[in-house]
Amino acid sequence: MLRDTSMKPLFRIFELSKNEQRVILIVMLVLITVVFVKYGRRIHSVPIRPPTPPEIKYPQSG
């Protein structure tokens, strides 16, 4: 029975007031939004390619 009483305070961390729940929800939404924005930028960004060397044109012999 000692285990039940020692575990009870651990689960009290999930008892949040309405204001605390609101803050947690806002923080989670902001973090998710940031992740999606970064992901979208990474997907839609054009990779920078090194410049191609100019073609060497040899004179035509003929």
Image: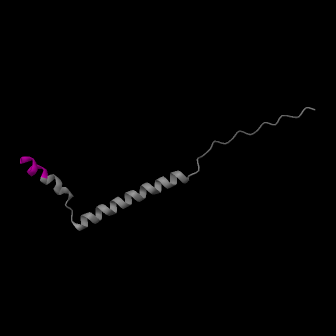
Main SS class of the magenta portion in the image: helix
Quadrant of the image containing the C terminus: top right
The stretch drawn in magenta includes residue 56: no
Relative height, residue 25 to residue 48 (above, below): below
- State the residue at coordinates (50%, 55%): 40
Q: Which residues are magenta?
A: 1-7
* 19 horizontally vs 12: left or right: right
Relative height, residue 46 to residue 18 (above, below): above
Q: Outermost residue toward the bottom?
A: 18
Residue 35 percent location from the top left of the image: 42, 54
Q: Quadrant of residue 11?
A: bottom left
* 35 horizontally vs 24: left or right: right
Q: Outermost residue toward the front?
A: 1
* 36 horizontally vs 59: left or right: left
Relative height, residue 58 to residue 18 (above, below): above
Residue 15 percent location from the top left of the image: 19, 61
Residue 19 percent location from the top left of the image: 25, 67
